Amino acid sequence: MSGSNRPDRGRRGRRGSRAHRAGIEIVSVSKPYITRKIPYFEVLDEEGLELIENNADTILEEIGIDFRDMPVALDILQKGGAEIDGERVRFPRGLCRSIIQASAPAEYTQHARNPDRNVQIGGKNTVFVPAYGSPFVFDLDKGRRYATLEDFQNFVKLAYASPSMHLSGGTICEPVDIPVNKRHLDMVYAHIKYSDKGFMGSVTAPERAQDTVEMIKILAGDNYIDPETGRPRTYASSLINANSPMTFDDTMLGAAKVYAENNQACIITPFILAGAMSPVTVAGTAAQSLAEALAGLTFVQLVNPGAPVIMGSFASSMSMQSGAPTFGTPEPALVLYCMAALARRLGVPFRSGGGLCASKLPDAQAAAEAVNTMLPAALAGVNFILHTAGWMEGGLSMGYEKFVMDVDQANMLEILLGGVDLSENGQAMDAIREVGPGVHFLGCNHTQNNFKTAFYRSPITDNNSFEQWELDGRLDHSQRANAQWKKVLAEYQAPPLDPAIDEALLDYIKQRKDSMPDSIV
């Protein structure tokens, strides 16, 4: 864990005491994130990984990366040792790796307003995060429609109520009923108001990233600065996408600069549809992805050495007949396995996608494609699994039923990553001795003591007899998921928020909105 992001146990304890005296109960969370206890799944040996690293360095040295419309970024990179030719930036072989490994933390703490929900990102840790960026939402009752602020708030509540969603998320869906230049304020406020988990910040303009930082300062108060390091604590991990192929634009660079300067984490992610934005091969896509990520990570470390970063990879295949993106296919899984290993070799946390699918309905295609993307992410050792829950229609739609279905899968993967229990209770030798040959285990003491927690119990799958299923209304999986998300929202209770903080946030939002005209960009 980075020294600049160590949790301050003393301050956390005092903060909890003040909240208790104020009559606010902070709920203790047993598993705010996952620490894996199973090996990584590897698809390349040392020679193969070195080959991709060498090819990435060749891309950086010979071809270069465009940093567009941001002269200050070019100046920062040139001072760091890069060669500038217009907006084309070339990096001498090994420069990016040396800069990143000299200062980027291998692991960091992302703080939440409830300190029991702080998460460790990096190492053997994994966090599941909801899907991100959809302009539409879908449910079985109303079908597909443009997302609203109410939908956004609903998904924040669903994520808050889902133990396997370790962060509240970012732009879970786009609330199109609010002007583009103002909606980021409502989204960040929703994460703070309706959840006490960590969240992702706005990246659609540098000033919107700055608004996120200012709202974090209001939320954190005296806890914002770590007195041991004098640096801000990290409260947001925000998505900075490369404009692949081999390009960063001023919007993403500007947001990255703001977050880096304020010690907030940047998730540098090449966003690639292989065949259009990268070569059609796994090795070619991996080399290009690594080169783009190295360039972005280097920029962040030059802005503020030691600022937390995550190396990201989002690589999807595409139909070579129609050009449409495809999900759940084997080639992107192979890219993911390669990139996870490369991130470990670089020594930084790694992010990739989660429950991706192209289906327009929460159907068998949606479930199969989602599992085919989530399972590789879990086995590969991804630290920050974005798009874990809700993704439909290639990311165009956020699904209520799909969200519940994906959370169910995340719950099971959390158990898988926990590995095999080899404790005395896990070995169960007392049960085997008690029962002996030819007798069932149902009534033995060990079974009676463990039956409530022995196996995962899904809230939406049906394992009853055919006759019981008929009596229960002959519901399919998506219909049971429909009932489940409604139940969760009906039972939702907001985590307590200090009224003074709430008032200060609302005042800031009003001041900012009053200072800008409505805009569609």
Image (spheres, helix red, strand yellow):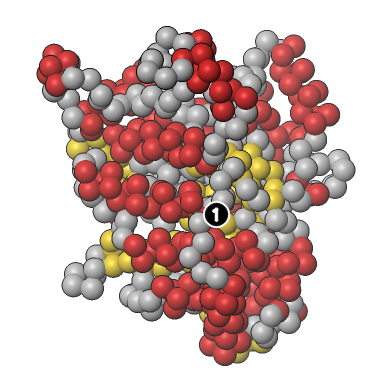
Residue 148 locus on image (x, y percent): 34, 38
Estimate how packed mark 1 is, as few (under 14), some (14 to 19) or many (20 or more) residues with alpha carbons within 10 Å: some
For the point 70% across and 79% down, which residue is it? 95
Helix, strand or loop at disc 1? loop
Q: How far across and down, in percent of the image, does residue 502 sit? A: 60, 26
Viewer-nearest residue: 49 or 447: 447
Q: Residue at x 46, y 29 (%)?
A: 162
Q: Is residue 426 visible?
A: yes
Counting the numbered discs, the total is 1
Q: Is residue 108 left or right of residue 448?
A: right
Tell me residue 482's x, y (percent).
26, 28
Residue that extends furthest to the right in the rendered view of this protein: 228
Q: Is residue 168 visible?
A: no
Work out whether 304 lies above or below 61.
above
Q: Residue at x 56, y 46 (%)?
A: 38
Q: Position of residue 111 (x, y in %)?
A: 67, 38
Q: Return the residue nearer the eye: 191 or 58.
A: 58
Residue furthest front in the image: 437
Q: Nearer the viewer, residue 268 or 340?
A: 340
Task: Tell me the residue at 41%/57% (across/down).
Answer: 521
In the visual, does 234 lie left or right of 405?
A: right
What is the three-letter code of the residue carrying label 1?
A: Tyr
Horizontally, is 287 left or right of 105 in the view? Answer: left
| Viewer-closest of 250 and 278 | 278
> Against 17, is 313 above or below?
below
Looking at the image, residue 509 sits to the left or right of residue 221; the answer is left
Q: Which residue is mark 1?
A: 40
